[in-house]
Image (cartoon, rainbow, N blue to C red):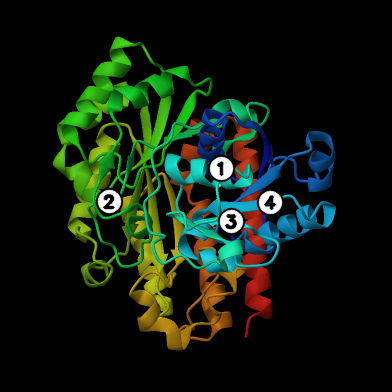
Amino acid sequence: MKILLVRPWVNKNITTVKNYLFGEPMGLECFSALLKENGVEVLLVDFMVEAKAVIETYLESFEPDAVGITSQCTDVENVKAIAKAVKLYCKAIPVLVGGVQASCFPNAFFVPEVDYVFKSTTRKNVKEVLEELEGSSNMRRIDGVYSRVLDFINDGEFCYNEYIVPDRSSTVKYRKAYKYVGYQPCAIVQTAYGCRNRCTFCIRWKIEGGELREVPIAEIVNQIAALDEPYVMICDNDFLINASRLETFCDLLETQNVKKEFICYGSVNSILEKPQLLSRLRKNGLVAVIVGYEAFEDRQLSIYNKASTIDDNEQATSLLKANDIACWGSFILHPDWSKKDFKKLLDYLDYLKPELATFSPLVPHPMTSLYETYKDRLLYDAEDYDKWNFGDVLIRPSKMSLKAYYWEVLKLSLKMNGNIYSVRYTLKAFPIANTLKMITGFNTLFSIYIKNMLTRR
């Protein structure tokens, strides 16, 4: 059996940082690994790299027995367009859809052109779907999978994704293109699933589970040692959570003489709980930590159910700086802000001076309690998938017009990205070619915000 795996093209209509956050398609790589375990011949096509390619070219040359497509929250229309093209080419070719959007809203793909939707992926359900495709078993309900033949009905579909070592050989022709901010080529590694925190705006702990599930760290270091990329993004919710595991991580890196530079997510509390470890992590390649500060007031942090305070934020920033680890801070723009609040955020940034800072308008995802809180003020329906991209304003502002709010977002964007300490850091940390790509990405983002300001009502 031969299966073609596809990552869709970038949705050009969305507001996102796609020009400098462009990682490998780990979901497809993991799926490829499971397919190969079952003797399937796999070809993975990344249309985010091959932006001008068409699916028919690969259908003709590879002649697959099935096509699998991954989905992010903004990829729904592109996924369905690829599925439709497959069926127009040959109606008998089964189409499988998985990915983040399929986990959150599998019903987005309950269409005639799609045959299977993976809400979650495990060795067991992949094997069972392959048996159906090969005709060696009858159609039945499979845990974690919705099928068109069963009218996409599956009462027992819930299970978490199983940890799978990604098949990075499937993306070998694309790997030099994968980047994270200014680091390129950059690999992505996940070492744990789930999260101890319960932030009201976050869906990752909803998807991955509220209990932390850690992969043996020795296995992770072996993966990292085998990577050709000099940079590694560790995409756990909070890589810095487990002190003993981090000590073992450093032990193994030193024993195996692994020399990489790492970026990771780390919570404020995890940083504060283990100041003695930061120096050793820096010596073993930790160059930047993405910290979700989210707000500049304790009241708002409490609403978001953050387990930290403004004072904690400041201490964590100081600890990172003292250990020569860059702080990449992220913030949420609240729809009830006034012009003074935007100014307060800028003042707070001037005080913290994170090396890089990003923001996102508050996203009341339907999987969170925020959806009920703000559903009467939503500017778009839950089915307007293009808009749920962490860039567009989704909630009608309460203290100014939407156009005025976008104007404040524009000014904030300019000042956050143009401050002297961020510019100085970028020029020092990244190759000039990568810095230019980041500028291009920012210009694209900036132009979309201008368009939103002029056209949104």
Q: Are marks 1 and 2 in contact (CB under 8 Å)?
A: no
The answer to whether residue 92 is left or right of residue 377 is right
Q: Is residue 337 above or below residue 263?
A: below
Mark 1 crowdedness (10 Å alpha carbons): few <14, some 14-19, many ≥20: some
* Whether residue 310 is situated above or below residue 354 in the rendered picture: below
Give the secondary structure at mark 1.
helix
| Quadrant, the C terminus | bottom right
The residue lying at 59 percent from left, 38 percent from top is 435
Q: Which residue is mark 4?
A: 94
Q: Element type at marker 4?
A: loop
How far apart marks 1 and 3 lie (CA) works out to 13 Å
Q: Which mark is residue 207?
A: none
Q: Amino acid at mark 3?
A: Tyr
**x then y, percent, for residue 129:** 54, 47
Quadrant of the image containing the N terminus: top right
- Nearer to me, 93 or 221: 93
**Residue highlighted by disc 2:** 195
